[in-house]
Image (cartoon, helix red, strand yellow):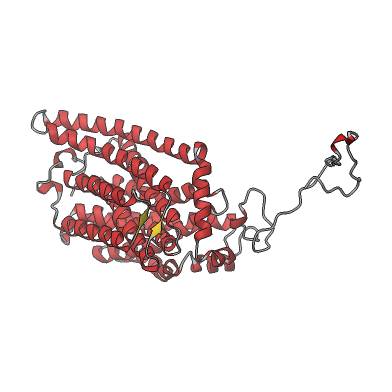
Amino acid sequence: MGLFRRNQAAKPDENVESGEAKVEPAESSTPLPVYNHNGHKVTKWIHPHGESGRKWFSPWHFVRICARSTSRVSAAVNVLWPFVPIAIAFHFAKPELHLWVFILNYIAMVPTANLVGFAGQELARKIPKVAGLIVELTLASVVEIILIMVLLRKDQIVVIQAAILGSILANLLLCLGACFFASGIRRDITHFDEHVSEASNGLLLVAGLGLLIPSAFYTALKGVLADDILQSRVLTISRATSICLLIAYLIFVWFQLRTHHSIFNQILEQDEENDEDRHKDLAKDKLTLTESVIAIVIALACVSLHAVFLVEQIPYVVEERHISDPFMGLILVPLVEKAAEHLTALDEAWDNQMNFALSHILGSALQTALLVAPIAVIVGWGLDKPMGLNFEIFMVVILILAIIVVGNFLKDGKTNYLEGALCVIVYIIVAITAWFYPNPHQGATNSAVIPGDHH
């Protein structure tokens, strides 16, 4: 841009041996405005793909764009928004109808979590791709963190532990399997980059081992040490392990954002080129930065309300409707808290963006194992609650086997609908088994370490 000068002619270099003219840079130059693919002037610090062409807040555009969402399935979920005020009204007007309050707030969590995912995606478009992906995953994990914090406040330790493992299983088996299957319907073989799968799969194995160790320690020494001593040591091991897992997560983020940023950025850019609906996505209207933040605040406020109302009904549902804590935590809670991520990943897999889909699925599973679980333990530590990583052996063994199965499917860098169907089938088997699994106080293996559970 400095080669073009409006007020002063270019002068050739006095050294004529080169035979070329050297153009002096302008003493003061104003950069020309940059426009994106839609002809919108790009705001400073905003990525061109995320430029909306508007400023601040427009109610009409805000509602219309949020209603459209990211895909047809995601937009269809927005028809559930009427359940949001209905669920809030039922909580205050009919608190004695415990089952109805639970069902209505469970349904209302889906569109609000979907809005968190959509607003996070809109915000992620405005910053570099790898950083945007991490921001998007973190915002989606906020829904999970809010739900777990409310459960922790209510001393629902068993449900929290099951929900942590259930969240990882829902990502690795249900969501990943659905993505493989959806992509396999449209194409015989779907390829993905080995860098995405190898780094995530290795970390998943480390996370699985970290989550297994406190449970294995408790099971090995149960009956050898006095129960109170064993519980105290398991809790100390859990807290130390949580700090180590948090450090592992921070190293992974640094690995993606700094030292190997160019590799992941190139992979994601190529995936955008593979998007079969790229022209439609680029042409869509987008939220402004202000609107994205407002959408996130509204969605998180609604999610927090419904999380509180939902968790208050869990003891009644467990006792009166005879739904076990393991099924509640392993299956029901993860399905609603991960709804937005599952819809986003499915849309990406359908459009041949498997690297993006894998980044969402595996990244979400890693955040649950390396960020959410340690935060739950550390916050419980601060509140003097016995929140540890001493999971039921049944659940943690299933988790390790799921990681091994998924790792086997990921190692060749390609997939098809058969592998997807097998993952979903395994998840259905886990769900059926969880339905019949007893509550810890009814004889499960690691029940003694959960004195804070007051069912």
277 or 114: nearer the eye? 277
Q: Quadrant of residue 448?
A: top left
Total numbered circles: 0
Q: Is residue 263 visible?
A: yes
Q: In the drawing, does residue 209 fall left or right of residue 352?
A: left
The answer to whether residue 423 is above or below residue 444 is below
* Residue depicted at x 34% and y 32%: 244
56 or 330: nearer the eye? 330
* Residue depicted at x 11% and y 28%: 225
* Residue depicted at x 13% and y 57%: 436
The answer to whether residue 212 is above or below residue 399 is above
Q: In the drawing, does residue 190 fall left or right of residue 268?
A: left
- Residue 195 lies, in percent from the top left, at 43, 45
Q: Is residue 154 visible?
A: no
Q: Quadrant of residue 15?
A: top right
* Residue depicted at x 64% and y 48%: 45
- Residue 72 lies, in percent from the top left, at 45, 70
Q: Quadrant of residue 93?
A: bottom left
- Residue 97 lies, in percent from the top left, at 25, 65
